[in-house]
Amino acid sequence: MTNQEIFDLMDRFERSTLHSMKLSRQDFSIELTRAAAPACAAPAALPAGAPAVSAAAPGPAEAPAITAPLVGTYYAASAPDAAPFVSAGDRVSKGQTVCLIEAMKMMSEVPAPCDCVIEEVLKASGDLAAFGEPLFRYRPC
């Protein structure tokens, strides 16, 4: 990469909503990160006439995920008639239970890894979950 290409990449990164980016080529690697935004702050509005950079913005599939810590059956609530632990749009605290995984008649609580907002629930109650499979997409706060 030329210096100009690196500067252009850095400029585009600064104008995007990305929090981090890593690019590797055969003999070159660059990693760009920015300080985290204040707790669940709304994204800054673009000035009028500014081009949107939607291709560089992370989509829901690229958001961080809470994954299954073991193989088992996913349960969204503590009982069939109980309300789910979390739903899309809920704000949760670090360590708060977001679901249960049953394996060999043992229930394991799955905690939130950080203060976050649940963006998407990826499993239905009663579904099987594989080790490391995404259960929720979230946005850190």
Image (tube, rainbow, N blue to C red):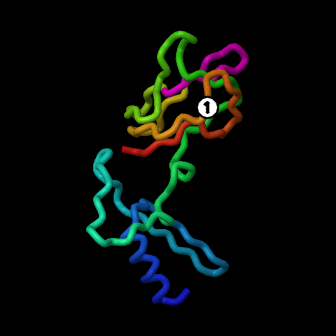
Label 1 sits on what residue type? Lys
Q: Where residue 61 appears, x then y in whole percent?
A: 57, 50
Query: The N terminus is located in which quarter?
Result: bottom right
Give left or right: position of 128 versus 116: right
Please report the residue visible at 54 percent of the width from the left and 37 percent of the height from the top: 136
Q: Quadrant of residue 18?
A: bottom left
Q: Which residue is mark 1?
A: 123
Using the image, determine if residue 135 lies above or below residue 12.
Answer: above
Using the image, determine if residue 76 lies above or below residue 116.
Answer: above
Q: Where residue 69 appears, x then y in whole percent?
A: 62, 33
Please report the residue visible at 48 percent of the width from the left and 65 percent of the height from the top: 56
Please report the residue visible at 56 percent of the width from the left and 71 percent of the height from the top: 23
Q: Where residue 128 appears, x then y in whole percent?
A: 70, 27
Q: Main secondary structure of the magenta part?
A: strand
Q: Quadrant of residue 74?
A: top right
What is the total number of numbered labels drawn onto the structure image? 1
Please report the residue visible at 30 percent of the width from the left and 50 percent of the height from the top: 42
In reply to whether residue 19 is colored magenta, the answer given is no
Using the image, determine if residue 85 lies above or below residue 58.
Answer: above
Q: 21 or 46, which is in the foreground?
A: 46
In reply to whether residue 105 is colored magenta, the answer given is yes
Q: Which residues are magenta?
A: 98-109
Give left or right: position of 11 versus 134: left
Q: Quadrant of residue 13?
A: bottom left
Q: Where residue 54 appears, x then y in whole percent?
A: 46, 63
Considering the numbered disc 1 on the image, is that residue within a helix, a strand or a loop?
A: loop
Query: The C terminus is located in which quarter?
Result: top left
- Residues packed near mark 1 inside 10 Å, few (<14), some (14 to 19) or many (20 plus): some
